[in-house]
Amino acid sequence: MTRKYFYPVFIFSLLFLVECRKDTTPPAPETDAALFARATSGGYTYYKGDASVHHSSPQSAHGGFFRVRFNAIAQAALTDQGKLPTGATFPNGSIIVKELHNDSTGTQLHGYAIMEKLPSDTSQADGWIWAEVNTSGAGYTINNKGAICTGCHSIDDRDHVRLFDLFP
């Protein structure tokens, strides 16, 4: 091989090896504390832009009163009518937070039901991380892998989010 070709081939080979050696370690699994922190942070949009508190459906296991908010990733998947199209799925990283209230005024928040779309996470079930916690973050942990959630949430055809059909 002549010197003319040696250096370009050498540089290309070196770049190829460096690229192949990049860390491909999967991200650390989600934690209850990290999910709670993101779910209680700002930057969410309420369902259809409505911050009103609504009475829960008789079909809801969460009971009482609620309002639902979406992070920007989940919000971007919704139509201009504020719904996920039938048969569509939310993108990875979507977070949906159902605020749980004791009354219709919204002044008595007692917890959160949280879904995060992370199909590669070890705590997921049906592609989602599931948690229901009180206002301090304690409660139904993601380690349960949605065992009591997926039965009801798999009824619909809008990526496990029942809100769109129960509260059109």
Image (spheres, rainbow, N blue to C red):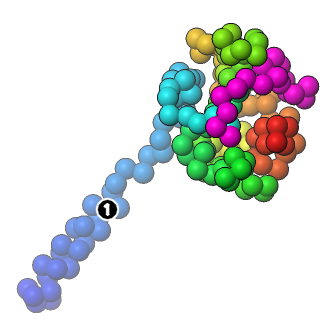
117 and 22: which is toward the camera: 117
Instruction: Check the picture and name the quadrant holding the N terminus.
Output: bottom left
The image shows residue 89, relative to residue 106, as above or below, that is: below
Number of numbered labels in the structure image: 1
Q: Residue 33 in the image: state x and y as whole percent.
A: 53, 21
Q: Please identify the quarter of the rendering in which residue 95 is found.
A: top right
The image shows residue 71, relative to residue 92, as above or below, that is: above
Q: Is residue 51 magenta?
A: yes
Give the secondary structure at mark 1. Answer: helix
- Describe residue 156's horizontal placement relative to residue 6 as left or right: right
Q: Residue 149 in the image: state x and y as whole percent.
A: 79, 31
110 and 13: which is toward the camera: 110
Q: Is residue 28 magenta?
A: no
115 and 166: which is toward the camera: 166
Q: Residue 108 in the image: state x and y as whole percent.
A: 68, 10
Query: Is residue 73 in view?
Result: yes
Which residue is pictured at 69% across the width and 46% down the height?
Answer: 82
Q: Amino acid at mark 1?
A: Glu
Which residue is pictured at 67% across the width and 52% down the height?
Answer: 80
Q: Mark 1 = which residue?
A: 19
Taken as a whole, is the magenta stretch helix, strand or loop? Answer: loop
Q: Please rate how many residues cluster around mark 1, counting C-alpha atoms within 10 Å: few if below 14, some from 14 to 19, many from 20.
A: few
Identity of the residue furthest to the right in this view: 58
Which residue is pictured at 8% across the width and 86% down the height?
Answer: 3
Query: Is residue 128 in view?
Result: no
Instruction: Check the picture and name the quadrant holding the C terminus.
Output: top right
Which residue is pictured at 16% across the width and 80% down the height?
Answer: 8
25 and 52: which is toward the camera: 52
Q: Please identify the quarter of the rendering in which residue 160 is found.
A: top right
Q: Residue 64 in the image: state x and y as whole percent.
A: 81, 17
**Numbered range of the magenta stretch:** 48-65
